[in-house]
Amino acid sequence: MDFSPEDRAWFDSNPDIKFGSKELGFGGAGIVYELDNNPNLVIKVPKRFIPYTDTEKMQDIDTRTKLFRVLLLKEIETYNKLKKLKIIIPTRVVKLGVKTASGEDYLGLVRPKLKTSLSDLIKLSDEQLFEFRENLVELSEAGYEVAGWLQVGIDSLGKVQIYDIGDIKHCEDKKSAYSRNGNTWYTFLYCTEKVKYFFSDPSRTKTFFKLYKLY
């Protein structure tokens, strides 16, 4: 997937990447902020990152963020391998304008802002679900699994995309990828009340059996 034409034009204008005013959430490796100068985009930075100018304080931040910087680099590596897949959120790697004591650039990941709430995911249409399923099949065919909960959101075009690429792992074979992604997919359908929805009306049951299996 790629950024929208509007977002690509914004990047082409060489804007400053400004963030910090609105934190949207955090995970095991990073914190996500809405961009101050473009609310359609978000940025993920290493957990515990604070852009101090004081050298002594920055050395302390280097120590605190070391593990999270490594995890972010692994996420960038995974993204570069899978970025052509439809299910993977478009990502632009940017320098944060701060270096570690050893001279390495602090990096951030800029992405489209998605609708990620459970209430939004519950409203996914049958068409969106089937497209999402096909994209999971594509990921499985590539030999990768989502190691955990499907952390996904809906973009401005109604497409479902994985935003936590750090949870995607390479499998030893396609069969394992299909099996593990299949379990994760069923859990997603259950938690978003889709299992309940399809079985609440006998006319929808056949649709569910076409939907829930990846293979």
Image (cartoon, rainbow, N blue to C red):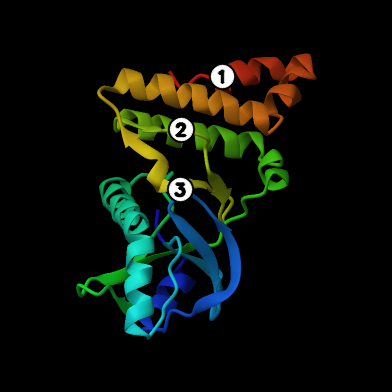
Q: Amino acid at mark 1?
A: Lys
Judged from the image, the secondary structure of the residue bearing numbered disc 3 is loop
Q: Mark 3 or 1 closer to N-term?
A: 3
Q: Amino acid at mark 3?
A: Asp
Mark number displayed over residue 210: 1
Judged from the image, the secondary structure of the residue bearing numbered disc 1 is helix
In this rendering, which labeled residue sits more in front, label 3 or label 2? 3
Give the residue drawn at x 46%, y 71%.
7
Q: What distance separates the C-alpha of mark 2 from that of mark 1?
A: 12 Å
Q: Position of residue 203 (x, y in %)?
A: 75, 17
Name the foreground residue: 24 vs 206. Answer: 24
Q: Position of residue 129 (x, y in %)?
A: 58, 35
Q: Quadrant of residue 141?
A: top left
Q: Position of residue 93 (x, y in %)?
A: 33, 66
Whether residue 95 can be seen here: no
Dot 3 surroundings within 10 Å: few (below 14), some, or many (20 or more)?
some
Q: Mark 3 or 2 closer to N-term?
A: 2
Whether residue 41 can be seen here: yes
**Vertically, is 208 above or below 41?**
above
* Residue with the mark numbered 3: 164
Dot 1 surroundings within 10 Å: few (below 14), some, or many (20 or more)?
few
Count of picture labels? 3
**Vertically, is 58 above or below 111?**
below
Q: What distance separates the C-alpha of mark 3 from that of mark 2?
A: 19 Å
Q: Quadrant of residue 26?
A: bottom right
Give the residue drawn at x 51%, y 27%.
184
